[in-house]
Amino acid sequence: MQYAALVRPALDRVYSGMRMAAREQCRRVSEQTGLRPGLNTSFYFGLLARPMPAAAFAAVTAYGGGDMSDELAQGVMAVDEHGTWSLTPLGREFTLALQQAVADGAQEHWGRTHIATMPGLGALPRLAELLAVLLEAGQATGGPAFAAAAPVYEPAGASYALQVSTRMGALRHHRGDAHRAAWAAAGLTLDRLRALDAADPLRTQVEDDTNRRDAPVYEALTEAQRWEFLALLAALPG
């Protein structure tokens, strides 16, 4: 099994569990500001750093749809004549608060250790370091979504929980780009892909090609570091 296939569920487990755990903190930000989160809560790591070009927007919204009417109505995002999306001043303030809320939720969630041997927050400094290596490597191999996601925005003095939650969110878009490229190369549309049975050989082909396209980013780590990265993810709660 390729390393990219092995690490994918571990990364998804930790990230999705953390985001679920941070929902209450994000809800409080929405209540305090009177604003509703949208694309800015799922892509804050990139939007806080730079505008999102049209090609990146198409990639990022391919699976969930690109209806931005609520963001425009609230005045938190704007789009120019080229289809480039950016945060407004109001949107930036809101998104900074959401980034911090996610980090606060991560700090609390990852700090829960059910047995004494779990590293808890002690795993975060090294995990942040390895994620930084992967994000740097991905600049050469990522697609349009990853290019909009990294380098990520992190405020000065960011906690390790903020660094890890932010960098982990951006890294997942390297595989997202790989997956879109794989099913497009197979001549599929998204609707056709979703209609495939889990055991369909064409779906297996797409997943194998996704792993192949995602694999180069992990080659920036030594073999020992790859196992260390996987072990650090395994040590965190989902």
Image: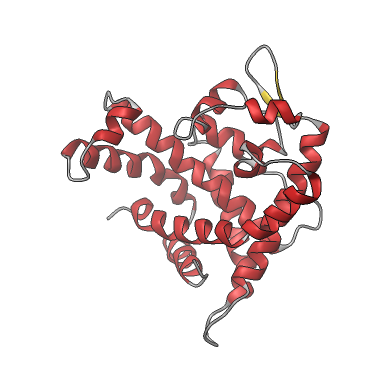
* Residue positioned most to the bottom: 116
Where is the N terminus found, in terms of image quarters?
bottom left
Quadrant hosting residue 67: top right
**Is residue 204 positioned above or below 122 on the image?**
above
Give whichever of 236, 157 is nearer the camera: 236
Q: What percent of the width, then of the height, locates residue 7?
A: 40, 57
Q: What percent of the width, then of the height, locates residue 71?
A: 68, 30
The residue lying at 53 percent from left, 29 percent from top is 144
Give whichever of 233, 212 is nearer the camera: 233
Whether residue 151 appears in this view of the structure is no
Q: What percent of the width, then of the height, locates residue 225?
A: 48, 63
Whether residue 47 appears in this view of the structure is yes
The residue lying at 62 percent from left, 23 percent from top is 53
**Is residue 108 positioned above or below 115 on the image?**
above
The residue lying at 30 percent from left, 35 percent from top is 194
Q: What percent of the width, then of the height, locates residue 48?
A: 72, 39
**28 to the left or right of 22:** right
Quadrant hosting residue 230: bottom left
**154 to the left or right of 170:** right
Q: How is the image coloured?
A: secondary structure
**Is residue 89 positioned above or below 156 on the image?**
above
**206 to the left or right of 92:** left
Q: How many marks?
A: 0
Give whichever of 101, 153 is nearer the camera: 101
**Is residue 158 positioned above or below 181 on the image?**
below
